[in-house]
Image (cartoon, grey):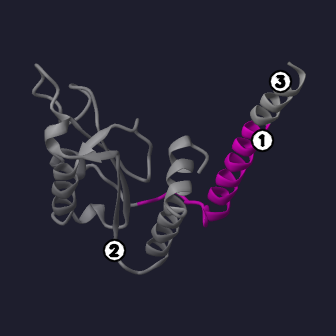
């Protein structure tokens, strides 16, 4: 909740990250088999082409809500992953992080990665909405203090110059 990206998304998107997490928790508490996919920065496939490199899509997954370095991932890759998950019963009740990684660190397709997925086994925090709200509030307060300080210095320099 305290990363700059989470704070910005929450500030500009009515606490979208906080409420998204609350939705994940509702799924986890239910009896419904779910697969939660947490993608990187989603964008069209065309914008991910790296000159002189055919390996712009080296795929990586972490289960159990694990962390991967945030990278661009195409809409098409996440759509493929969503459909492929249906063929792997072991991904039921799993939280997946999906990113692209450098060549040699991942796979060209999700199949080999999905075979290794295990259902969620760790305890996820019950709620993070208050932490998200606090992070946004603290950031807004700090921005207002900073802006007020700059304004005050400007006014004082006009008075005393």
- Between marks 3 and 2 in the image, the one whose residue lies nearer the viewer: 3
CB contact under 8 Å: marks 2 and 1: no
- Between marks 3 and 1 in the image, the one whose residue lies nearer the viewer: 3
Secondary structure of residue under mark 3: helix
Question: How far apart in space, not on screen, are marks 3 and 1 (Cα)?
Answer: 18 Å
The residue where tag 2 is placed is: 33
- Residue at image location 90% in from the left, 22% down from the top: 160
Question: How far apart in space, not on screen, are marks 2 and 1 (Cα)?
Answer: 47 Å
Predominant SS of the magenta segment: helix
- Residue at image location 52% in from the left, 67% down from the top: 19
The answer to if 127 sits in the magenta stretch is yes
Who comes first in sequence, dot 2 or dot 1? 2
The answer to if 115 sits in the magenta stretch is no
- Residue at image location 40% in from the left, 39% down from the top: 68
Measuring from the top left, give residue 113's x and y in whole percent.
23, 46
The residue where tag 1 is placed is: 145
Tell me: 133 left or right of 56.
right
The residue where tag 3 is placed is: 157
Please give the range of residues in magenta: 120-148
- Between marks 2 and 1 in the image, the one whose residue lies nearer the viewer: 1
Which is more toward the observer, 64 or 53?
A: 53
């Amino acid at each position: 909740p305290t990363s700059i990206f989470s704070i910005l998304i929450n500030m500009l998107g009515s606490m979208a990250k906080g409420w998204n997490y609350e939705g994940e928790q509702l799924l986890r508490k239910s009896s419904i088999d779910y697969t939660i996919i947490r993608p990187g920065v989603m964008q069209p496939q065309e914008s991910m082409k790296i000159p002189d490199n055919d390996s712009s899509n080296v795929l990586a997954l972490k289960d159990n809500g694990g962390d991967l370095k945030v990278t661009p991932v195409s809409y098409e890759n996440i759509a493929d992953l969503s459909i492929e998950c249906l063929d792997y019963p072991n991904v039921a009740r799993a939280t997946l992080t999906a990113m692209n990684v450098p060549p040699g660190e991942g796979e060209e397709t999700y199949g080999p990665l999905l075979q290794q997925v295990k259902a969620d086994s760790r305890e996820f925090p019950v709620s993070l909405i208050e932490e998200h709200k606090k992070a946004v509030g603290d950031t807004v307060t700090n921005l207002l203090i900073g802006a007020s300080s700059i304004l005050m210095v400007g006014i004082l320099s006009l008075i005393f110059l």
